[in-house]
Amino acid sequence: MSLELSQLVAGLDELLAVQDFQDYCPNGLQVEGRSRVARLMTGVTASQALIERAVEWQADAVLVHHGYFWKGEPQPLTGMKGRRIKTLMQKDISLIAYHLPLDAHAELGNNQQLAALLGIQVTGVMDSPAWPLGLVGELPEALSAADFSHLLSRKLKREPLHLAGHARPLKKLAWCTGSAEGGIFRAAQLGADAYISGEVSEKTLHEARELGIDYFAAGHHATERYGVKALGEWVAKQWGIEQEFVDLDNPV
């Protein structure tokens, strides 16, 4: 089975409502390869290692969460950036990337997928429903910080960094995957017992203590591997093409 590249991209653009987002990078087709897609490789970041795996697997396209052409980055196609794009173009492999639209999707998005993985019941969004990049929810039962940390470690296969802001059990949670430690302020406003994101800054420790909220830095890669995996599985089910998710180890 195969489909036109243009049909694949149009279907994904519509599914993820890319027109509704002002992002830090272009969403959708970033590098154009062959016109038909029978094999789709998915991964979190379009690194050289992922591209080489796609070449080995003879993929027609690569679908990722972190693609290229970020605002503020150098424009020339030289060095590392040039080598990545050169490999894709020489092998006639397309690169398709969705950033904020994949974070926010109500079913396949990174935040929804993380909730499903951890068994959190979603009860709302951190900000506007039209821009649901962060979510709010509750655990089935209250857990100690140590037990919740163990849950994160077991499910994400990565030890989280826990910054304690209080000593009470954790029941109400807020979270935003990736690099979103600044959301701790909104989480505290919403009365969450803990806020989960991917990365952490030095100042986050002081913020957690002074806001009275626990913070868990669970890993940028670890919290965002599930959205693109779910999206690839959706594509395979929708169009019957082969897809393979590659989880390249990343401790960050």
Image (spheres, rainbow, N blue to C red):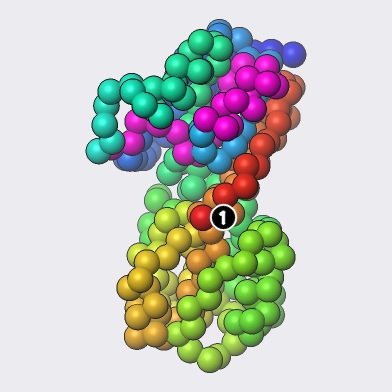
**On screen, residue 191 above or below 243:** below
Residue 194: x %, y % from top left: 51, 76
Q: Is residue 74 visible?
A: yes
Q: Tell me residue 162's x, y (percent).
A: 53, 75
Q: Is residue 61 rendered magenta in the image?
A: yes
Count up the numbered dots: 1
Which residue is disc 1 drawn over? 251
Magenta-colored span: 48-71
Q: Residue pushed farthest bottom?
A: 167
- Residue 251 falls left or right of residue 150: left
SS class, disc 1:
loop
Label 1: how many Cα within 10 Å (few below 14, some 14–19, many 20+): few
Point out residue 13 in the picture as x, y percentages from the top left corner: 48, 28
Residue at x 59%, y 37% (from the top left corner): 43
Residue at horizontal 34 percent and vertical 40 percent from the top = 23
> What is the three-letter code of the residue carrying label 1?
Pro
* Residue 67 against residue 218 in the figure, above or below: above
Q: Is residue 186 above or below residue 170?
A: above
In depth, the one of 130 and 91 nearer the eye is 91
Left or right: where does residue 80 sit relative to residue 44? left
| Image x and y of residue 104, in percent | 48, 48
Is residue 134 in view? no
Name the side, left or right, on which 32 lies relative to 58.
left
Seen at 59% across and 87% down, the residue is 169
Answer above or below: position of 209 versus 248: below
Closer-to-camera residue (132/36): 36
**Residue 243 or residue 102, whichever sits in front:** 243
Quarter of the image with the N terminus in it:
top right
Residue at 28% across, 23% down: 76
